[in-house]
Image (tube, grey):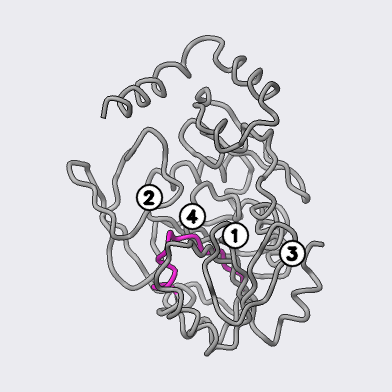
Amino acid sequence: MIASQIKYFYKITVPHIWGYGLLCNLLKKIFTKIDINLVTRIPVKPGIIVDVNLSIGNLKLCDPERCSIAKKLFWTNGNIIPKEDNFALEYFINLAKNSKYIFDIGANSGIFALSSALVNPKAKIFTFDILPESMHILNKNIHINGFSNLIKSNLIGVGANSYFDAPKGNVSSEMPTSVKLDSKYPNIDTIKVEIKTLDDIFTDLQVSDQSCIKIDVEGFEGDIFKNAQKVLNHHRPFILCEVLNTTEDYPNYCRILSENNYIKYLITDNNIKSHDKIIPHERFKDWLFIPKEKTEDVLLLMPK
């Protein structure tokens, strides 16, 4: 308890001291070879805009003092590491190039949606998140990148039709990268956030052409697939999905994907490998789910 209080006090005081920003830049040069998981624990001076380096150009992310994704990119000088994370984003970028509709579910900082807007400004791009604070930072990122007319952000969850009591403000000294739908927030003001099925979302938006979807919902992706039968069977989207090694529902949505003739590929640090079944990996967490009839064309688009 005392340790957490000290950590919180440090985060809300030290980064605001004059000269702390110069110190952070110095530390980046000194600790270029240090374990990134260690250095990213160091708070960042508030107000910094982080430049992100992509193969297709550059993006900007705000509020690294609150957003752990932006903070990590600050310490890595805008380079996405480890390799498997960079590959996952590059694979999605290539799918986005050839899609008319793009969905970033569990958007957080919005880096997948922002990258999609950079590479395919003619696409219709939608983001979904259930945390108001995430939505606030996401909208700032959309604005500073000049994509306000390209990306539509939605404070909506995706899964089974229901509601989630989301915290209105900060739930910790740093914005969480994701939140579980069964999380409870006692003694905190909350707001009811609607959760809609993917089938209903596609119907409401009148999706009528090729789409690609990124899913990062902290183990609740099973609810999305169970309520997306029309999408999987009729619309046949490309899907990039995070599968954590703590996920328990993967056999059920693996079956749903197989029944709808989707090929499953695990993204590693140097390639993608097809699997008959989804088996969560201790290190590699991102999977591509591609309609069987589109695999040959899609694999030709993948970065080498």
CB atoms of marks 3 and 2 within 8 Å: no
The residue that disc 1 covers is 284
- The amino acid beneath tag 4 is Ser
Look at label 1 and name its amino acid. Phe
Q: Please identify, in this view, whether the residue under mark 1 or under mark 2 is nearer the observer.
A: 1
Q: Is residue 214 above or below residue 72?
A: below
Nearest to the observer: residue 258 or residue 168: 258
Q: For the point 66% across and 25% down, which residue is it?
A: 31
Mark in the foreground, 4 or 2: 2
Residue at the disc numbered 4 = 153
Q: Is residue 99 above or below residue 1?
A: below
Residue at 67% of width from left, 85% of height from top?
Answer: 292
Q: From the viewer's perspective, is 27 left or right of 184?
A: right
Give the labeled residue for mark 3.
Answer: 271
- Whole-Å distance between the Cαs marked 1 and 2? 26 Å
Q: Quadrant of residue 14?
A: top left
160 sits left or right of 93 in the view: left
State which tag comes first along the sequence, 1 or 2: 2
Q: Quadrant of residue 91?
A: bottom right
Which of marks 3 and 4 precedes in the sequence? Answer: 4
Marks 3 and 2, how far apart at CA: 33 Å
Q: Mark 3 or mark 2, which has the lower sequence index?
A: 2
Front: mark 3 or 2: 3
Query: Is residue 133 located in the magenta-colored stretch of the structure?
Result: no
Question: Does dot 1 land on a helix, a strand or a loop?
Answer: loop
Secondary element type, mark 4: strand
Q: Quadrant of residue 144?
A: top right
Q: Which residue is mark 2?
A: 131
Left or right: residue 252 versus residue 112 is left
